[in-house]
Image (spheres, rainbow, N blue to C red):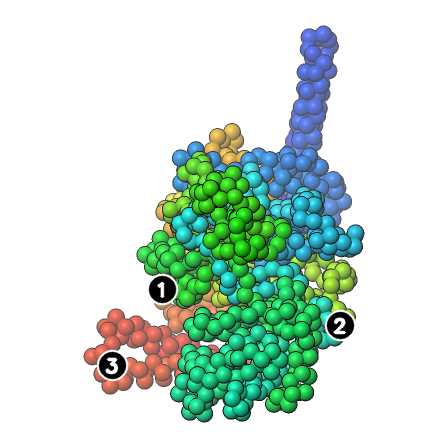
Amino acid sequence: MDNDQVELAPQSLENDQVTSKRGLILGFLTFWVLYPGIMAQREEKEHPNGAKEEDLERKKKKEEKAREKEMKKLKAAQKAEAAKAQAQKGPNTSKKNERKALRKDAEDENPEDFVDPVTPHGEKKRLSREMAKQYSPIAVEAVWYAWWEKSGFFVADAKSSRPPFVIVLPPPNVTGALHIGHGLTTAIQDTIIRWRRMSGYNALWIPGMDHAGIATQVVVEKKIMRERHVTRHDVGRELFVAEVWKWKDEYGGTILNQERRLGASLDWSREYFTMDQNRSRAVTEAFVRLYKKGLIYRDHRLVNWDCILRTAISDIEVDYKDIKERTLLKVPGYDNPIEFGVLTSFAYPLDEGMGDIVVATTRVETMLGDTAIAVHPEDRRYTHLHGKFAVHPFNGRKLPIICDAELVDPEFGTGAVKITPAHDPNDFAVGKRHKLEFINIFTDDGKINSNGGSQFEGMPRFKARVAVIEALQKQGLCRGAQNNEMRLGICSRTNDVVEPMIKPQWFVDCADMAKEACDAVTDGRIEIIPKQYEADWFRWLKNIRDWCISRQLWWGHRIPAWYLTLEDDMIKEFGFYNDHWVVGINEKEAQAEANNLFPGKRFYLAQDPDVLDTWFSSGLAPISSLGWPDDTEDMRAFYPTSVLETGHDILFFWVARMVIQGMKLAGDVPFKQVYLHPMIRDAHGRKMSKSLGNVVDPLDVINGITLEGLQKKLEQGNLDKNELLVAREGQVKDFPGGIAECGADALRFALVSYTAQSDKINLDIQRVVGYRQWCNKLWNAIRFAMSKLGSDYIPPEKLVIESLPFSCKWILSVLNGAISRTILALESYDFSGATSAVYSWWQYQLCDVFIEVIKPLFTSDLKSESLKKATRDTLWVCLDNGLRLLHPFMPFVTEELWQRLPQHAGSISRKESIMMSDYPSVVEEWTNEEIENEMNLIESTVRSIRSLRTLLPPNERHERRPAFVLCKTNAVAGIIKQHELEISTLATLSSIKVLTENDATPVGCAVNIVNEHLSVYLQVQGFLNAEAEREKLRKRKEELQRHQENLAQRMSAPGYEEKVPQHIQEDNVAKLNKLMGELEIVEEAQANLDHTLADGN
């Protein structure tokens, strides 16, 4: 669609009549412009002291505005009259003069009219007098958000009678910056919440921020080391925590401000932080309640241990690196790379001089904590060793040889397995089954402790690995090494190799709560979308392990548990006696509990120094964000929430934990639906990684960035030289020209439209650029409308459908279809389907067809004013509905364009913002299948004619040419004749003629088949590419013959008439007749082509 100028058609008037009429009009307008000033002067003379100074000033400004408005009308009239006069000079020079007039208009334009005035922060945007000629994301998106927020449009009312719809934003880390995953989450959730708000719901979207225990502590530890060269231990716990709060207040929370840039309509009045006072109270209350229910306990269990952080970490903080063979990797704290992917075999001497038994391991250093050797009970090689012992070569410890069919595979290796219960998950289970000794050989920072023996004590674990192998070699016990495929756990925070270690920790007993969570999905209280993830949900919950919730950190929620050291305890070590723990809301409550537990005893209380897992507090988000444990208005109005939207990668780490905590503590499921979005990859399907240079910052897509800018950001990171080189090369390949400025609207629309791609999204930035260009299409559609509606246009209260022209009835009918499909898709969380429905209507139906079809209407004087008014009214209704339909996906540009649309004068139903307006709904009287079918035939005809143009040389393809339409039925001929103007306009024809079967086939034409009843011919005499046309017809004939033969074969198959339903048989007969009809047309076209070429020769 082109951006038309306002046009006035020439009138058939004599020059003197034109001059006379023009003089009268200009004289009248001149008087009208000057009249307010004359009257003002007269009033001032008659009433010199009769008005206050401020009233006169106000009146003066009003009059100036009126004069400016009338001067515009005067200029417009002058231009119109000039155009009319020029039209009388003849059509030959009209296009040339029209171009001159356009250039003259451009020269007369005031550039300031196209620039938005400065808008004070938080006020409604002040729009330019004229729409800019091109869409600019920065200009459009700069001001609206502050006004939305200040106006309270995002705030939900707990007292409202409207039905609630609630989403809790997954709280991003306080240390975080916006990444493309956040962008997808925001785009989807804001689409949902804006749609629901516009659909009459009391929509609440709660923002929050996670204190991110490990990540934040690491950041601040690095900061004080860099600035002051001290560790947290040098500073001390109290001062270090104060330092973290200071950092949080100064730098934390950047990401929530970045959410505003994406247009997130979050209720900021309800913003929370997981470490604020209310949330901290909720966390303590939750711990105490679960403890009192017997669901939290303390025990020695195996955990993922980070030797740099000196804490247990959760499974989600462990990344796994697949190693195929011997590989050297850099490990923090070691100068030289460490060897992985090697299976080392060594022998344990057997007791009583029975020889030895060979075992193998990828972690030789852990043999210092071995307490048994396992064999399969049916392995005859070791039957004689059942109940015997091996002897540890370094400390003489006797290791029982045990039988375990569950662990040992007799076909793998030697069939004998060393058992280290304190440092391996499988061995831990064996140790429990066989009541083995659990020996921890590592200190918290990953060095060998005294249990490892004086020979190795104090060695870092990977240096001890080398030392142990050397010691085994000296004793002649080494049996060689070989490549071994393995998965290595790496801490995502520190890049340290995760060490399984047995530690005293606090755990949540999840068994019964997991069953309740399964039942909630089974009985429909919670729906998981897409449904495929239900299987993962059940599999994980049915095999759930108890949840380790304690962390050896300083930043986080301190565990509300105190240890009693009794005066008469034999061992005073902190935490030694498991029955000496008490739990309470505060120390006073713990003191009372201790007195009840040990009446009359003297003791000393000390709080557990550990903090709770961050997932424990974030798992409370649906209830704590609404004020739990208090009985608040928000809890009563908004719990349970409506939907939880997040990535499928945290279905277990977060979603499942919210469910078990919400059901146990608040008595109901925390949300009714769970929508899991795909994970984002780059355009090549690779995981986004800084080391590959393919990480996409949403703000770079919104604002645009050069290749140099992208590479500068890389250099500011912490990549090593080799990684930096690879990353730079990756950026040059993927973003050779940088990233174009796309704006938030285009990015949001692209991300939401991508959600159909299964469990992964391969993000191509060029697709985002395409949607940014589409925004320009929307912009031009409104510019066109504004030029045709006029400054004095008043929208209709209601359309009278019966009186509308064909194209108007059609666009309203397909608009109904788009509205219906969009709402249905949104209700089923088919966001890709929703964007497709909206995009298709705007692009292919409104812009490509309707606007093109109505253009001639506004340039012709032959059309009645009532027809033009009906078309203007339909255009306005379409744009108003179309912008509201699109708003949840693209909030900024739709607000800007909607505010520019003319509105009902003094209408009380008019909302201040599009986001507070009603979402479009289907209007039954607009639906007209008959008209849609007619337009489908018209569009098919146009497409067929357009495809014929490709046979022409490039410089001839856009010239207007005659076309012929051969109709084989009267019904089809009637439709084509009735819509010749639409076909000519859309297909850019100079003329169109309808032919019947009795008419001679046009000569010098290329032919295309629309259907069995209709074919089109385009006049291409002298420009026809004969070979291309012949090849096209040949391929079409072969295709039709193939379909015909296949269908005929099916219809002649044995038992066809007995087995195939009657309605299908009838359909097949119709299909066969259609194919035969089209085949006949192709054969006729081939004969005509041969005849034409023969005549030409």
Residue in the picture at 28% in, 73% down:
1064
Q: Foreground: 443 or 107? A: 443
Is 655 left or right of 77, judged from the image as shown?
Answer: left
Residue 985's x, y, as percent?
54, 58
Examine the image and state in which quarter residue 761 appears. Answer: bottom right
Say what amino acid the circle numbered 1 marks.
Answer: Asn
Label 1 sits on a secondary structure element that is: helix
Residue at the extreme right: 228
Q: Where does residue 673 sit, x and y in percent of width and height? A: 41, 53
Which class describes the residues within 10 Å of circle 2: few (<14), some (14-19), or many (20+)?
few
Residue type, numbered disc 3: Tyr
Neighbor class of circle 1 (other Cα within 10 Å; few <14, some 14-19, many 20+) is: few
Residue drawn 51% across the image and 91% down it: 354
Query: Which element type, helix, strand or loop, lies under badge 2?
Result: loop
Residue labelled with disc 1: 970
N-terminal of the pair, mark 3 or mark 1, is 1
In three-dimensional space, the C-alpha distance between marks 2 and 1, rounded to whole angstroms, equals 89 Å
Quadrant of res 814:
bottom left
Q: Which residue is denoted by mark 2 in the rendering?
A: 335
Q: Which residue is mark 3?
A: 1056
In-front residue for pair 82/376: 376
Residue drawn at (50%, 71%), measured in percent from left and top?
437
